[in-house]
């Protein structure tokens, strides 16, 4: 059974930092494209950052220079380090694993940034 379990969300003031974790089980994360998405209330789920099997990463323009995605192969866990948080970063953050036509999602973790 595949599980992606996100953690690390919470309430933080603007300018603060959080680190989200996505612990994978049932799959080997380094063999998948691992991504973080976020969904603000009433909006679509948007891609925030991705790390692919080679270790290459990419971030959305809105978070470049502030967010960093990384992977710990020994822990089978993917992280999203979020610095200089803004109120517009508020939303539910989801972890996604994809490999060709196979896609798995986590249950999400809430991030709230107050101004």
Image (cartoon, grey):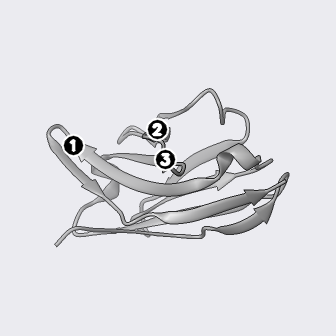
The answer to the question of whether label 1 and label 2 lie on touching residues, with beta carbons closer than 8 A, is: no
Q: How many marks?
A: 3
For residue 12, what is the image quadrant?
A: bottom right
Label 2 environment density (alpha carbons within 10 Å; few <14, some 14–19, many ≥20)? some
| Image vertical order of residue 107 relative to residue 78, above or below | below
Q: Is mark 1 on a helix, strand or loop?
A: strand
For label 3, the residue is 42
Q: Label 1, label 2: how many angstroms apart (C-alpha)?
A: 16 Å
In-front residue for pair 87/62: 87
For label 1, the residue is 99
In-front residue for pair 77/65: 65
> Looking at the image, is mark 1 or mark 2 nearer the viewer?
2
Classify residue 15 as left or right of residue 108. Answer: right
For label 2, the residue is 47
User: Residue at position x 42%, y 60% from top?
Assistant: 73
Q: Label 3, label 1: how many angstroms apart (C-alpha)?
A: 28 Å
> Looking at the image, is mark 3 or mark 1 nearer the viewer?
3
Q: Label 3, label 2: how many angstroms apart (C-alpha)?
A: 16 Å
User: Residue at position x 64%, y 53% from top?
Assistant: 90
Quadrant location, the N terminus:
bottom left
């Amino acid at each position: 059974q595949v599980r992606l379990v996100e953690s690390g969300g919470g309430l933080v003031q603007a300018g603060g930092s959080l680190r989200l974790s996505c612990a994978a089980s049932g799959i080997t994360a380094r063999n998948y494209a691992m991504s973080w998405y976020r969904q603000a209330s009433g909006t679509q789920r948007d891609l925030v950052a991705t790390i692919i099997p080679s270790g290459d990463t990419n971030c959305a323009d809105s978070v470049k220079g502030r967010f960093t995605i990384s992977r710990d192969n020994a822990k089978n866990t993917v992280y999203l380090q979020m610095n200089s948080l803004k109120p517009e970063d508020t939303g539910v953050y989801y972890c996604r694993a994809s490999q060709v036509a196979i896609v798995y999602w986590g249950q999400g973790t809430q991030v709230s940034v107050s101004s």
